[in-house]
Amino acid sequence: MDTKAVKAATRRAIDLAGGQSAVARALTQAGKPITPQGVGAWYRGGRIPAPHVLDVERLNQAAAQAKPETRSTLRPDLYPAP
């Protein structure tokens, strides 16, 4: 997956999960504290750090009405498509 597609998947996953503040709040409540500004850096940079990929995937799946982003679309370097 190319860099442009990963950036788009990252942005879509954060948006589907309720936005930057909602993602930060959910991760902080799950014991992985992060600020909305930190999530904003992921959004702008188009890449979710490895320790948070599975958490964002879970948030995304819980919130998605349509097809959610998966770990293989968010970080294909760590989770190749099956």
Image: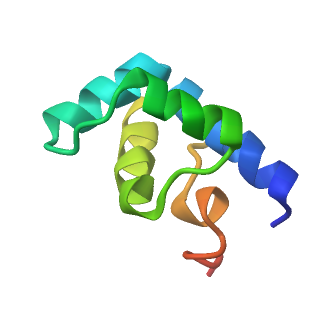
Q: Is residue 37 left or right of residue 44?
A: left
Q: Is residue 34 left or right of residue 53?
A: left
From the top left corner, tell me how far across and down residue 62 is, in percent. 37, 37
- Of 40 and 27, the residue lying toward us: 40
Residue 4 vertical position relative to residue 26 in the rendered view, above or below: below
Q: Answer with the quarter of the image where residue 35 lies.
A: top left
* Residue plotted at (26% across, 30% down): 26
Quadrant of the drawing holding the C terminus? bottom right
In this figure, which colouring scheme has been used for the structure?
Answer: rainbow
Quadrant of the drawing holding the N terminus? bottom right
Q: Is any part of residue 70 visible from this angle?
A: yes
Q: Is residue 36 left or right of residue 9?
A: left
Q: Is residue 2 left or right of residue 76?
A: right
From the top left corner, tell me how far across and down residue 16 is, in percent. 54, 28
Residue 24 vertical position relative to residue 46 in the rendered view, above or below: above
Q: Answer with the quarter of the image where residue 13 lies.
A: top right
Residue 33 vertical position relative to residue 55 in the rendered view, above or below: above
Q: How many marks?
A: 0
Q: Is any part of residue 64 visible from this angle?
A: no
From the top left corner, tell me how far across and down residue 30 is, in percent. 16, 41
* Residue plotted at (41% across, 22% down): 36
